[in-house]
Amino acid sequence: MRVVIQRVAEASVTVDGKIKGAIEQGLLVLMGVEDADTQEDLEWLSGKMVNLRIFDDENGVMNKSVLDIGGGILLVSQFTLHASTKKGNRPSYIKASKPEIAIPIYEGMIAQLGKDLGKPVATGIFGADMKVQLLNDGPVTIVMDSKNKE
């Protein structure tokens, strides 16, 4: 499972001209699923995301988590995170899971993040043509992969 985490002042996702999910200060998380992903990957990533100390404390030092600030999380599925650009100029998405595998994992992440955060998580719609707007705060952008726990 691969995620791109962006610290935001605000973010929203729109589908068919209607806002589907929105948050104020918090994390915009773009998530890609591959067939080898498990419940363990999901739980590990969720725990890391809600506890990442990437928000400023009173001294301007990144020392607070989204939990500490009472922020929100907007989770958006994005299969293109598993693009392979090894050959040619057209990315291959062969590593990205098909919906029958990815949807249950995506829904599991929504539930796990909600549990770990202590409140509902805003989302897009899996597989939809989504328009994502964000005001990146910092900017702070972190990429994590459950298969590369460094």
Image: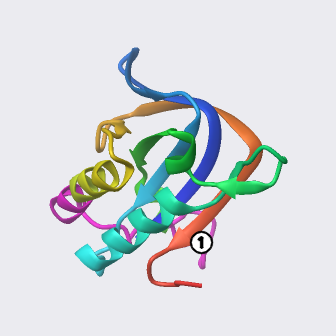
Range of magenta residues:
83-105
Q: Is residue 32 above or below residue 36?
A: above
Residue 93 falls within the magenta-colored stretch: yes
* Screen quadrant of the N terminus: bottom left
Which residue occupies the foreground of this view, 32 or 62? 62
Residue at x 28%, y 53% (from the top left corner): 115
Residue at x 50%, y 39% (from the top left corner): 70
Instruction: Give amino acid for label 1.
Output: Thr
Residue at x 64%, y 45% (from the top left corner): 7
Q: Which of the 4 quarters of the picture holds residue 96?
A: bottom left
Q: Secondary structure at mark 1?
A: loop
Q: Is residue 36 above or below residue 92?
A: below
Q: Which of the 4 quarters of the picture holds residue 16?
A: top left
Residue 11 falls within the magenta-colored stretch: no
Numbered marks: total: 1
Query: What secondary structure characterizes most of the magenta part?
Result: loop
Task: Looking at this view, name the residue that lies furthest to the right.
Answer: 59
Q: Is residue 94 above or below residue 17?
A: below
Q: Is residue 30 left or right of residue 126?
A: right
**Which residue carries the number 1 mark?**
85
Task: Looking at this view, name the residue that lies furthest to the front.
Answer: 58
Which residue occupies the foreground of this view, 139 or 55? 55
Residue 3 picture location, percent across and down: 50, 61
Q: Which of the 4 quarters of the picture holds residue 61?
A: bottom right
Residue at x 22%, y 58% (from the top left corner): 108
Q: Is residue 62 left or right of residue 34?
A: right
